[in-house]
Image (cartoon, helix red, strand yellow):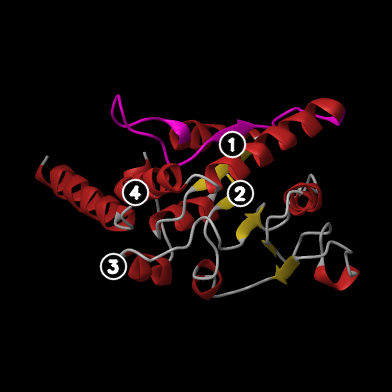
Amino acid sequence: GLEHALLRRELRRAAEGPPRDLALDRAPVLVTLGGSDPRGLTEPIVARLRARGVPVVALVGALASAGAPDRGLPIEGATWMRSVDDVVPIFDRVGWALSAAGGTALELAALGHPVVSLATVSNQRALAHAWAERVAPHDVGVGPSFDLVGLEGEALARALDEAGLALVRLRGEAAASARHARAARARLDGQGAARIARALALLGKSQRAT
């Protein structure tokens, strides 16, 4: 589960600090679709958000072919960043995020960023489901999630429209943004690696005892 999420050391240290004072309704939205973005979704997502006047920071990996800054993509108001080693300073600049349901989404949530997650490939479905899951009857999840696996053409375009609209709506509601941010911090405290290490240590002791 999310309480066992494995975070990089620098993200774990940042998550241990006090909650950030994020301007969720004014800060740019981070769009990140993984190291390679094999389906080329970064560009259409950024275009949809910019069409609604939302400032965007797009973070792309070294293997991403679409949305590369060196292509000079003409989407005014979007900042493109590629192959960044230390993402914490970027996270400090943004509020909401729209991310593939993978490791970066976990890191964002641990730092208190509400995230709209996208399952772009089948192995991301479990995390996307856990993302939107409520931990209490009157609580909210870390953020909405959308399953894009197998969608192409008009069906994919509609799903991207829905994801963008959900983010824009929530970003404009201060109370809703704050609830999702609290849920993110509550469910990902950055101590997943320590919990797994303790569990493995206990397992080792148990096996030696037998």
Residues 14 and 208: in front is 14
Which residue was labeled with disc 1? Answer: 123
Q: Residue at x 25, y 52 (%)?
A: 195
* N-term-proximal mark, 3 vs 4: 3
Distance Cα–Cα, label 2 vs label 4: 17 Å
Question: Can you tell which mark lies on residue 182?
Answer: 4
Q: Which residue is mark 2?
A: 98
Of the numbered discs 2 and 1, the one sitting upstream in the chain is 2
Distance from disc 2 to disc 1, alpha carbons, whole Å, reads 18 Å
Q: Dot 3, crowdedness within 10 Å: few (<14), some or many (≥20)?
A: few
Q: Position of residue 68 (x, y in %)?
A: 82, 65
Tell me the element at label 1. Answer: helix
Q: What x and y, as percent, mark residue 54?
A: 68, 55
Residue 188: numbered disc? none
Q: Measure the C-alpha gap from mark 1 to mark 3.
A: 32 Å
In which quadrant of the rendered view does residue 153 lie? top right
Tell which tag, 1 or 3, sits nearer the viewer. Answer: 3
Pinpoint residue 137: horizontal percent, then vertical percent: 30, 24
Q: Residues within 10 Å of mark 4 (few under 14, many from 20)?
A: many
Alpha-carbon distance for marks 3 and 2? Answer: 23 Å
User: Which amino acid lies under the numbered mark 4 shown in the image of this protein?
Assistant: Arg
Does 201 lie within the magenta span? Answer: no
The magenta stretch is 132-153
Q: Amino acid at mark 1?
A: Asn
Task: Give the mark nearest the N terminus, 1 or 3.
Answer: 3
Q: Is residue 53 left or right of residue 24?
A: right
* Residue 147 forms part of the magenta stretch: yes
Question: Label 4 near label 1: C-beta < 8 Å?
Answer: no
Residue type at mark 3 is: Pro
Q: Which residue is mark 3?
A: 18
